[in-house]
Amino acid sequence: MKLVSYKIKERPSSFRVGFMLDEKVIDLQEAYRQLLLSKQETDLSNDLEKLLPVDPKHFFAAGNQLIDKAKEAYTYAKTNSTEGFSLNQEEILLSTPIPAPTKIICVGKNYAEHAVEMQSDVPVFPVLFAKFSNALIGPEDVIEKRDVTQKLDYEAELTVVIGKEASQVKKEDALDYIAGYTIGNDISARDLQKRTPQWLQGKTLDKSTPVGPWIVTADEVGNPGNLSIRSTVNGEERQSSNTNKLIFDIPFLIEFISNLVTLKPGDIILTGTPNGVGVAMDPPQFLKDGDVVQIEVEKIGQLKNTVMGR
């Protein structure tokens, strides 16, 4: 199931949780209402906001408990009419699926070839840094290029969405704590990143980090350790790899991180980027106004954004 955050273009409204079905967006709450009515659970259908909140932040913060309800609604919608709560993609705007996670944890230098191209040693422990939610944008937003940086770069990343509270998790159990997966583009201002030992200032500029276009639930992805991942800029391939080349795989990362800090439902982890970034090219190729960056991850889809100067 592909979960999205959407709103209707022609109406003043907030973003709502929906899911993709036959290239259309289905409103999750309304699909669940119809499911309850089909079971003659009329009283429950009148109190849906408590059962299944429509706000993406609250929905994903509840984790797998609500995702299980969403799967019930999805199964119902596949075999029943969705008239009245089914929308064509031209009618709606998609936002980043989780607009304000409590934690955005990123992993640096997690592909050996990327560490080498950055003239760095292959790390012995995961290199962790953070972003803030001000950086997040969705699949229909532009990547802002601010005058403060002249060296804006792309980084294709498989992104993990946590589905239940995780503290001191063993890697053997780690996949049970995942709600699903999405795509991240860890846009980096290399000149800001490198001017101090700490990377933060180059990693969390306003409206700089696309995440989306949806969250694919963990059951549909299966093994996250063997997914092709690639990026293009203006149609030219820049990165092409596979998550089987991660130095620290996803179960290890969840064990490692959850022994440092408790992960909450809705937290996201950007797992690292392969080689082929712009700063490592000869000569370096940084993003400029009008560039179109597309990230593709197998079993998840594509995330495309345009760079716009500000």
Image: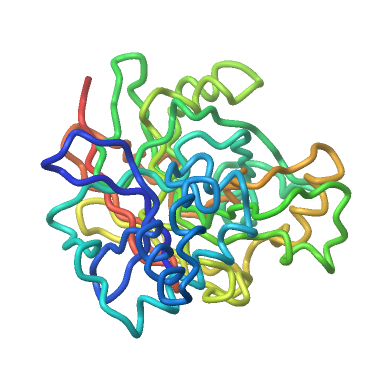
Q: Position of residue 229 (x, y in %)?
A: 46, 65
Name the quadrant of the N terminus. Answer: bottom left
Q: Residue at x 50, y 39 (%)?
A: 57
Q: How many marks?
A: 0
Measured along the vertical axis of the image, is residue 140 above or below residue 214?
A: above
Give the camera-side residue of 14 and 221: 14
- Quadrant, the C terminus: top left
The residue positioned 53% from the left and 60% from the top of the image is 181
Q: In this orientation, does residue 188 appear?
A: yes
Q: How is the image coloured?
A: rainbow
Question: Which residue is most to the bottom?
Answer: 79
Residue 267 occupies quadrant: top right
- Can residue 238 be seen in the rendering of this structure? no
Relative to 279, does residue 231 appear above or below in the rendering? below
Q: Where is residue 134? Give x, y as percent.
A: 45, 25
Image position of 24 (left or right of 303): left
Residue 187 horizontal/vertical position (percent): 42, 37
Q: Residue at x 63, y 35 (%)?
A: 103
| Closer to us: 297 or 12 | 12
Q: Is residue 282 left or right of residue 197?
A: left
- For the residue pair 304 and 92, the one nearer the viewer reads as 92
Residue beneath the point at 15% across and 43% down: 9
| Coordinates of residue 24 in the picture (x, y in percent) | 23, 67
The image quarter in which residue 76 lies? bottom left
